[in-house]
Amino acid sequence: MIDKATVMNVVGVVDPALKPYVNITHLTPTGIQLDLPAYILSNHTDFSRQVSSLLGVSHDVVATNVSLQPYQTQLEKKRLPGIKNIIAVGSGKGGVGKSTVSIQLALALNRLGAKTAVLDADIYGPSVPRMLGLEHSIETQDGQFLPVDCHGLSAISIGWLVDPKEPTIWRGPILSRVLMQLFEKTRWPELDFLIVDLPPGTGDIHLTIAQKVPISGAVIVSTPQAIAMDDAIKAKHMFDKLGITNLGWVKNMSGFICDHCASETEILPTNHQTALSQDNCLGSIPMIPNICYAADNGQLHELDQRVTDYYTTIAIEMQRALVDSSVVSTQPCWPKVEIQNRR
């Protein structure tokens, strides 16, 4: 008879990092059910077979069930109904591929089995509609927005609520009010992850989200050269000051891969001396022309496995960081202003 201690020891051999987060929900000679509280394995079948082999039982004896739990946020008691974890994807500078990474991260999480949605919070320059390949008008029901279902994801974007050819000329208070409506007045399905594609920079939208939306963690996207990483570090410090856990950063456009010879050439100067480069890098994504073409034509879900493997790695590493993360303490983020009386 196999006991729980033996099973857990075997789990520790297969994946030591996973062991603290596994629960045994069923244990008999003919059936072992393991609950995994995080989507940090890319192939659950391989995991089950490795555990079965080490236990000396048939591979159909061990089954896995993924049950993701809500993780800590910077807002202790607030949760959005039905959403377990909200991940903010930010960057200090525009044009570094943040929106592409956001959608690809969501698609990767979906492939790993997580129920995932995307919220396009880049009010001034929403990219999600084009990248998902949908010209759509948001429908409402009982005063709530109905998210768009696309390629296994649910999505909402201001780009589906306004004329795509018109600029969004709104002041901060209006931006904040509209943004919170997207969060709170959308009829989201039950979600394991809501990926929020933030605008670049450190402005009103970021402060609104930090003060009103429970964020489980943030991912920062940057290209490797110093001019981009300098701004990415500012984004990191912003999340630190707002009490949002930094899960790591993604090095985008890390090199160019030739379609003909498959060799990789570093074409952007890499800055290895910044504080950001010393933090946890979730993964690197090279310049592959197909990624750009797919983003422009709403075909990101059709990229081949050679490309999607980069994003799958990032999705797995992000969740490992989430499992190991703890909420950081909020730091003052307002400038100190002193008024002195003149005599």
Image: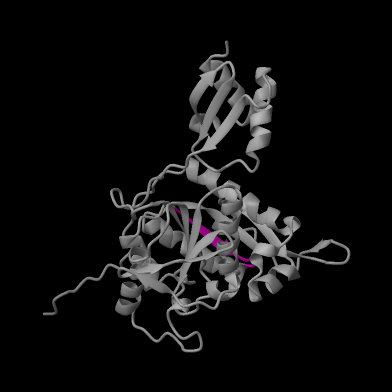
| Residue at image location 51% in from the left, 33% down from the top | 35
Q: Nearer the viewer, residue 192 or 330?
A: 192
Which is the main secondary structure of the residues drawn in magenta?
strand
User: Residue 294 vs residue 115: left or right?
Assistant: right
Indicate left or right for 122 with 268 as reference. left
Q: Which residues are magenta?
A: 217-225
Q: How many numbered badges does the structure rendering display?
A: 0
Q: Position of residue 250 (x, y in %)?
A: 60, 58
Decide if residue 189 is in sight here.
yes
Pick out the residue farthest to the right.
261
Q: Is residue 36 above or below residue 162?
A: above
Q: Nearer the viewer, residue 143 or 243?
A: 143
Whole-percent x, y for residue 286 in the image: 72, 62
Q: Residue at x 36, y 84 (%)?
A: 170
> Which residue reaches farthest front?
141
201 left or right of 15 in image: left
Identify the image quadrant of the N terminus.
top right
Image quadrant where one finds the C terminus? bottom left
Q: Position of residue 56 (x, y in %)?
A: 68, 17
Q: Residue furthest top?
A: 1
- Image spot of residue 179 (x, y percent): 36, 71
Compared with 269, 16 (above or below) is above
Q: Residue at x 74, y 69 (%)?
A: 290
Q: Residue at 22%, 71% (x, y): give it.
A: 338
Q: Within the magenta stretch, is there residue 221?
A: yes
Q: Is residue 135 above or below residue 38?
A: below
